[in-house]
Image (tube, helix red, strand yellow):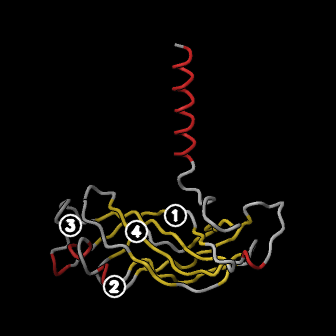
Amino acid sequence: MRRATLAICIALLLTMGLACSSDRVEDTEGGVILSVTDFDGLPVQVSVNGNNILQMDSVQIQSFPKNANAPSSTLMDVEMRSYEVVYERVDGGVNNPAPMVRSIFGLVPVGGTTTYDNLVIMTASQLRNQPLSDLLIENGGVDRETNSQAITVNFRMRFFGRTIAGDDVATAPIRFDVEFVP
């Protein structure tokens, strides 16, 4: 009985350890960890009528050496390549906007930062297609799935790069909600 209890406890601890590390990106190839350390200018509520694109004012990405005690080199600098935004409704609806992937350029030196201003987080076509198009005045201004005049969407954003040495790295996702209204 004691061995079975011990085995169950060990299994639970291992499971908890794996679950807790799911958002960490230390298992990426490079000798650095990319992290979104600051972001500003997030829209909280957006009218789909009259908006062509949705942007974030600024986002700062920092590169940390995985081992702070080990020597670093410019081979650990990260060339930024792209970012993705995945959308998930949190209002009971199941029809989500299509994900967006965009190319970006820039260099994040090991131990340094880079800032991107006015990043597009949703395109005009996403605002004009299902499910958000239901909220357009010409379409009645009401979501067909929930019969509501608002659609709340969780945005999950990640950034991807490659070290000068050729190792792929990525940030953990940042998450935020936006409420769309007519």
Q: Which mark is residue 86?
A: 4
Of labels 2 and 3, earlier in sequence is 2
C-alpha distance separating marks 4 and 2: 16 Å
Q: Is residue 65 left or right of residue 98?
A: right
How far apart are the two marked residues, 4 and 3, measured between alpha carbons?
A: 20 Å
Where is mark 3, residue-wise?
143
Whether residues under marks 3 and 1 lie with C-beta atoms below 8 angstroms apart, the answer is no
Q: Please report contact status of discs 4 and 2: CB closer than 8 Å, yes or no.
A: no
Q: CA distance from mark 3 to mark 1?
A: 28 Å
Depth check, front residue: 99 or 127: 99
Measure the C-alpha gap from mark 4 to mark 1: 10 Å
Pick whichever of labels 4 and 2 is earlier in the sequence.
4
Is the C-beta separation of discs 2 and 3 under 8 Å?
no
Q: Disc 3 residue type?
A: Asp
**Residue that badge 2 annotates:** 124
From the viewer's perspective, is the residue at label 4 or at label 3 nearer? 4
Task: Determine the CA span between mark 2 and mark 3.
Answer: 18 Å
Give x and y (percent) for residue 174.
52, 64
Residue 72 location, quadrant: bottom right
Mark 3 / mark 1, whichever is N-terminal: 3
Neighbour tally class for label 3: few under 14, some 14-19, many 20 plus, Cα within 10 Å? many
Mark 3 or 1: in front is 1
Q: At which x and y percent is residue 41? A: 53, 74
For the residue marked with disc 2, what is the amino acid? Ala
Amino acid bearing label 1: Pro
Q: 82 or 44, which is in the foreground? A: 82
